[in-house]
Image (tube, helix red, strand yellow):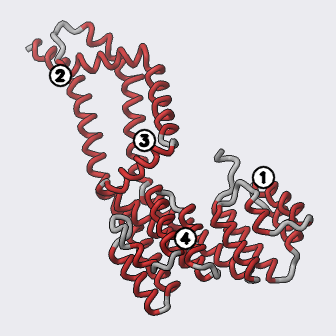
Amino acid sequence: MFLDSISTQEKVDFVKNLALLIKSGKPVNESFDLLSRQARSSVMRKTLENAKEKSERGTPLHQIFEESPHFEKVFVSFIRAGEESGTLEKNLLNLTSWLERQHTLKKEIKSATLYPKIIVTFAVVLSAGLALFVLPNLVPIFATLDVELPLATRVLLYISNVMQDYGLYIIGGLAGFIFAIYLLFKLEPLKRLWHRFLLITPVAGSMAKDYQLTVISQLISTLFRSGLTINASLEIISDSVTNTRYQDALDQIRERVAKGTSFSETLKNYPDLFSEVFISVVATGEQTGSFGESFDYLSEFFATRLTEKSKRLPVVIEPLLLIGIGVFVFLIAIAIIMPIYEVTKGLY
């Protein structure tokens, strides 16, 4: 699945180059041919070769990308709006801006959470190494000691014996269990339950809301500049946000806006999803006629806030992880040292 995909950076480069070629007057099919020869991945090269063939048969540009599994609905919508309004070049540049902002935001979040991931991985590897390689070698030594083993040591030896006899089965079972949980949460009812729970968790919930509001603000800002109405934009955005609660809310908001209710007014029905700041800025934009500029401000505001929270996350998690690892190592050390201490004490 991962190998059969196109990276965001490659999409950005492709859209930029396509906009440049179209601006220079080059036909779309020739642009596809040129860009396919410059493609870095085989997936992009095959995709553009197919696009060239379809464009030569007269297939509209947006339909070409719509039929490809590698381009999301928002990507297609930008191009469709550009074709229908005669501003394809401008919309391709708007699409580039959207892709770049999304790519930058995801990179910043990944960078901020890299350290906790490394610490957790290290802890797991350390635990597995002790259980599978170090502790089994200590069993014969403890068996020869003529002392009653402390409870901590007996527990440690029991775990060691279990891991030595059934370690591969346990690891395989855990991997299977995690994979099964992953598949279960793909089911719609459980996914909705998980998304609802995620939004009310103390730290992750706040970051999840900021991420959804950043995506919504960036998309409305960019789509509005591309000539789409708020109603059309909301339909695209509800398919682009990743949380089902926001998807449901945006679908309901779109229905009410279509009936004539103002956007800011409908947002007030979802105070747990849209903050007062968000609603206030949207209302100001509606009143002053600066709707697009309001969402430019909101996208910058929430993206900055999300980045700051991501950077503070390691500061919160690091002490907890280090304490956890320290306690684990301390218990292992005590379980190993105490029997040896009992033996040496008996010698004096």
| Residue ranking furthest to the bottom | 288
Q: Which residue is mark 2?
A: 338
Of circles 1 and 2, the one toward us is 1
> Which residue: 43% across, 16% down?
166
Give the Cα separation between the discs numbered 4 and 2: 65 Å
Query: Could you tell which of marks 3 and 1 lies nearer the N-terminus?
Result: 1
Residue in front for this viewpoint, 295 or 150 = 295
Query: Could you tell which of marks 4 and 1 lies nearer the N-terminus?
Result: 1
| Residue ranking furthest to the front | 259
Query: Residue 291: percent from the left, percent from the top?
Result: 50, 85
Query: Could you tell which of marks 1 and 2 lies nearer the N-terminus?
Result: 1
Q: Identify which amino acid the numbered label 1 is placed on.
A: Ser
Q: Which residue is mark 3?
A: 121
Q: Identify which amino acid the numbered label 4 is placed on.
A: Leu
Give the Cα separation between the discs numbered 3 and 4: 40 Å
Answer few, some or many: residues within 10 Å of disc 1's Cα (few below 14, many 20 plus, some between 14 and 19): some
Residue 42 is marked as 1
Of circles 3 and 1, the one toward us is 1
Q: Which residue is mark 4?
A: 234
